Image (spheres, rainbow, N blue to C red):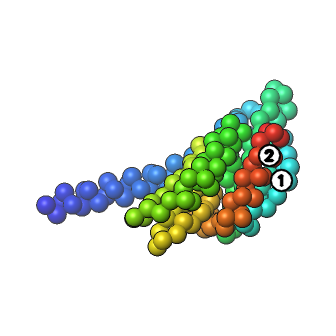
Amino acid sequence: MLLSFTLSMLFTSYLTAQKTADKLESNAEIFSETAGSFVQRGFEPIGVVARCKLECLHIKDLISGHSISALRFEGGLGSKAAIIDADEIAALISSIQILNKTMAATAPQYYTEVNFKSRSGFSAGAFFEKGKWTQFMKLIPYDSDTFITLSTDDMDKLLNELQTTKSKL
């Protein structure tokens, strides 16, 4: 019995460690790190939402001429960054709109959360606890230093910035 418990705990620890070791990456990050490329990165300022800087990241391989753009969030403790691919912006906008229109008007009977998650692990959403909704962004999974709570005004500003940025990507 003790042996099976110990093995179970070791396996669970291994899986947890594996989850944190596996880095989720956006298509922009993968493109940026392609071996044999000569990459130029441009950071176009967009704005600031709740102590989090937003930028359009423009990446170009100067050898092949191929380019890609994405949205970059920088914030949290230690100024950590997350990248959202251009094709994910529409889904993030829709998620925030649903949150603002539908979820905010509900009052679940128990703890509830709603969450958008990008390829890179960036997430945004809200949770209902103690009779109220709390909105948030989390730049990096498994890193509590990148968890940022958002006011309703912050979420509205984020939505506006996303809608503006979508056309630049």
Q: Is residue 144 left or right of residue 81?
A: left
Residue sitting at x 83%, y 53%: 46
In the displayed orientation, state which residue is furthest to the bottom.
Answer: 130
Quote the CA–CA distance across marks 2 and 1: 7 Å
Task: Point out the image quarter for the N terminus.
Answer: bottom left
Label placed on residue 165? 2
Q: Position of residue 149 (x, y in %)?
A: 62, 67
Q: Compared to 21, does 87 lie above or below? A: above
Residue sitting at x 38%, y 54%: 14
Label placed on residue 7? none
Residue 88 lies in what quarter of the image? top right
**Element under disc 2:** helix
**Element under disc 1:** strand
Residue 154 lies in what quarter of the image? bottom right
Q: Amino acid at mark 2?
A: Thr
Q: Position of residue 24 (x, y in %)?
A: 57, 46
Q: Compared to 116, does 49 lie above or below? A: below
The residue carrying mark 1 is 46
Pointer 2 and pointer 1: residues touching (CB < 8 Å)? yes
In the displayed orientation, state which residue is furthest to the left.
Answer: 1
Residue sitting at x 75%, y 49%: 162
Does residue 41 show up? no
In the displayed orientation, state which residue is furthest to the top.
Answer: 64
Q: Is residue 61 left or right of residue 80?
A: right
Q: Position of residue 118 (x, y in %)?
A: 60, 46
Q: How many marks?
A: 2
Q: Amino acid at mark 1?
A: Ile
Residue sitting at x 19%, y 57%: 4
Question: Quick one: 134 or 4, which is closer to the camera?
Answer: 134
